[in-house]
Structures are given as C-alpha cells and as structure tokens.
C-alpha cells in the first residue's frame, strides 16, 4: 500500500468528523453490507443474577467499536399505578389521580477515546396509565408509546439497542427484533438425584447423566417458563447459560450439551459463571468502573462475539 494511501478506518473517521456516523462510513469504505440496528430482548425466568451478564455483553460490544444503548425500564408500570391507588385510600374523593412517572435519565457508561465505541444507559417508563373508557370496565388503559418513542429515537444513533425490562420473561413482540434466552443454573444436572448407586465408602452417588440427558433436564428445568402463559410462539436467536456455581463437568461434556441444544433448535451461544459475585447488588447493572475494566469486559467477549454473529446472520424483522 502506498505510504499516503488512506485506510478504510481513516476514511471513516474523517467522515465521522464531518457529521457522518462512523460505523456507516466504515461499511461504505469497506464495501460491507450494512445491518439495520438490532433491538435485542433477553428472556429469563429470574433476572436478579443476570444483570452483570447483560451489562458485560453490552460493554464487550462497545469496546469492539459498536454503539450500544442499554434501554432500561425505569419503574414497573403496576407499581406506579398501585402507588397512586395507595395514596388515594385516605381521600374522600372517588377519583384516584395516577402516579407521576419519573423523568427519563441518560448517562454515558463508557466511550472510546479514539474510536466509535459507545455504551449509553437510558432509563424511562415503558408504559403509562391512561384514563379508562366505559368498555374497559374501569380498569386503566396501558399506553406503551413511551417505549415505542424511545426505540425509534435510538435507531438512528445506535448499532444495538438492548431492552432491559423489569419483567424479563415476557417477550416484547412490538419492539424487539431479536430474542435470546438466558438460562440460570443453580445446580448443574450431571447426575440423576432420584437414582443412587453405592460408592466405595458406603456413600450413595447419583447415577451419571450423559450430556444429552443433561441438556434435556436443563431445557425442562430452566426454559420451562417459555412455554407458560400466554402460550405464544417466540422465535429465539440463541441460548446463553449462566451457572451460579462452579460447573462439575469439563469442556467436552459441555460441548455435548451444546450439540444437543443445537439439535433441539436452541443455538448455543456460550457459558458464563457468576464466580463470587452473588454478594453484588441484586438486579443492578455493573458499575461504570467495571464497564471500563478490560479484565471484566474480556470475560464476556467470546459470548458477545457469537451473539453478534448470530444477530447479523438473521434477517432483521419485527418478531
């Protein structure tokens, strides 16, 4: 290459200085096919121990040069409506004024000093209460326009929008373009606890399970919430497993579990360990210092890379 010839990245940076979006300019410079922004919804039965996983994946994307938004639900809709009802109990008026929702907040969690990478957090109410009509039998009407507007505003700025709701288990069909399920494992099913064999010292040991049997137990135990109410089909783009304790099996065993998950139509995206993080604040995204820590981000880069590949390989459409 001639000494003064510009690289695609240099050309993209010059374009970004003039107001163009760096990632779009880079795709033009390299001839890459542009991808529409992904609106990702993680699904989980219990989310208390999973915030670090989601935050780590988002941070890994940002550190790799993507512009990522964590769009979090500020407060649960029903908690605000019920707080309004509690305030109205002591009043003589029959009318109950709805609770005032909190104002949206936006903060930059991490920004690359010399590149396009950006991780932003935006918290807002996703739905509000409207006055009921006669056909609603007195129940408040749910208006989800705040979430619709927040997603629409972010589509022009970010490459990936990660939805972080208060209740993770319910799919967001109106706004998400992709869904990934996170299975949280407390006790890894490597043995059958219902059947025991005598050990050499007189103790009883559970009958070992094959990787295929273990995969079947994991699907039943950790993914059963997907088949509950309202029994609507949901297209999944992959599954991530997080174990709250050290895994009692080796990498070959986990590879067998992944093969069986893939056979069942659940694309495996990786395994994560919480380590000693169980004392961290419950239901809270990682602190800004952690999101800047290369060691913290490095732990999530393999899963983030596989997940981004899976998202880019699918046609982006509303689920």
Image: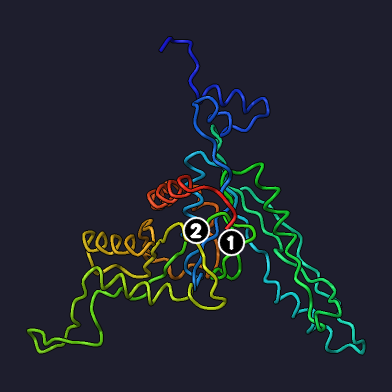
| 152 left or right, relative to 38 | right
Rendered-image quadrant of the N terminus: top left
**Point 26% across, 59% down: residue:** 255
Q: Secondary structure at mark 1?
A: strand
Give the CA distance from mark 1 to mark 2: 9 Å
Is the residue marked by circle 1 packed among few (<14), some (14-19), or many (20+) residues within 10 Å?
Answer: many
Residue 221 point in image, percent of width and height = 38, 77
Q: Quadrant of residue 112?
A: top right
Residue 88 point in image, percent of width and height = 84, 84
**Point 21% across, 87% down: residue:** 195
Which of the marked residues, 1 or 2, is nearer the chain's N terminus?
2
Which of the two residues, 156 or 251, is positioned nearer the viewer here? 156
As displayed, is residue 243 above or below residue 121?
Answer: below
Residue that sits furthest to the right in the current view: 93
As displayed, is residue 84 above or below residue 306?
Answer: below
| 85 left or right, relative to 207 | right
| 41 left or right, relative to 244 | right
Q: Secondary structure at mark 2?
A: helix
| 28 left or right, relative to 149 | left
Is the residue marked by circle 2 packed among few (<14), some (14-19), or many (20+) residues within 10 Å?
Answer: many
Q: Which mark is residue 54?
A: 2
* Residues tagged 1 and 2 counted as in contact (Cβ below 8 A): yes
Q: Which mark is residue 66?
A: none
**Point 38% across, 76% down: residue:** 220
Q: Quadrant of residue 77?
A: bottom right
Residue 233 point in image, percent of width and height = 52, 68
**Point 38% across, 64% down: residue:** 241
Residue 52 point in image, percent of width and height = 48, 60
Which of the two residues, 276 or 42, is positioned nearer the viewer here? 42
Rendered-image quadrant of the C terminus: bottom right
**Residue linked to disc 1:** 164
């Amino acid at each position: 290459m001639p000494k003064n010839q510009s690289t695609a990245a240099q050309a993209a940076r010059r374009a970004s200085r003039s107001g163009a979006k760096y990632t779009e300019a880079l795709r033009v410079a390299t001839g890459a096919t542009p991808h529409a922004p992904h609106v990702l919804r993680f699904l989980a039965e219990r989310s208390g121990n999973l915030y670090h996983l989601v935050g780590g994946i988002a941070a890994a994307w940002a550190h790799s040069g993507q512009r990522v938004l964590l769009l979090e639900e500020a407060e649960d809709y029903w908690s605000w409506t019920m707080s309004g009802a509690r305030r109205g109990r002591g009043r003589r008026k029959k009318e109950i004024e709805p609770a005032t929702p909190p104002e949206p907040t936006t903060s930059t969690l991490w920004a690359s000093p010399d590149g396009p990478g950006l991780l932003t957090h935006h918290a807002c109410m996703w739905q509000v209460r409207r006055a009921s009509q006669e056909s609603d039998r007195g129940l408040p009407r749910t208006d989800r326009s705040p979430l619709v507007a927040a997603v629409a505003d972010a589509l022009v700025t970010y490459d990936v929008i990660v939805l972080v709701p208060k209740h993770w288990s319910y799919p967001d069909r109106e706004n998400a373009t992709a869904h990934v399920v996170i299975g949280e494992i407390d006790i890894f099913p490597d043995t059958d606890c219902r059947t025991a064999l005598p050990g050499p010292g007189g103790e009883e040991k559970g009958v070992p399970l094959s990787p295929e049997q273990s995969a079947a137990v994991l699907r039943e135990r950790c993914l059963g919430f997907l088949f509950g109410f309202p029994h609507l089909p949901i297209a999944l783009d992959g599954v991530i497993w997080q174990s709250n304790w050290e895994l009692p099996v080796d990498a070959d065993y986990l590879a067998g579990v992944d093969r069986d998950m893939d056979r069942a139509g659940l694309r495996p995206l990786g395994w994560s360990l919480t380590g000693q993080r169980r004392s961290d604040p419950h239901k809270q995204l990682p602190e800004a210092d952690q999101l800047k820590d290369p060691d913290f981000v490095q732990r999530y880069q393999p899963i983030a890379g596989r997940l981004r590949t899976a998202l880019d390989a699918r046609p982006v459409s509303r689920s």
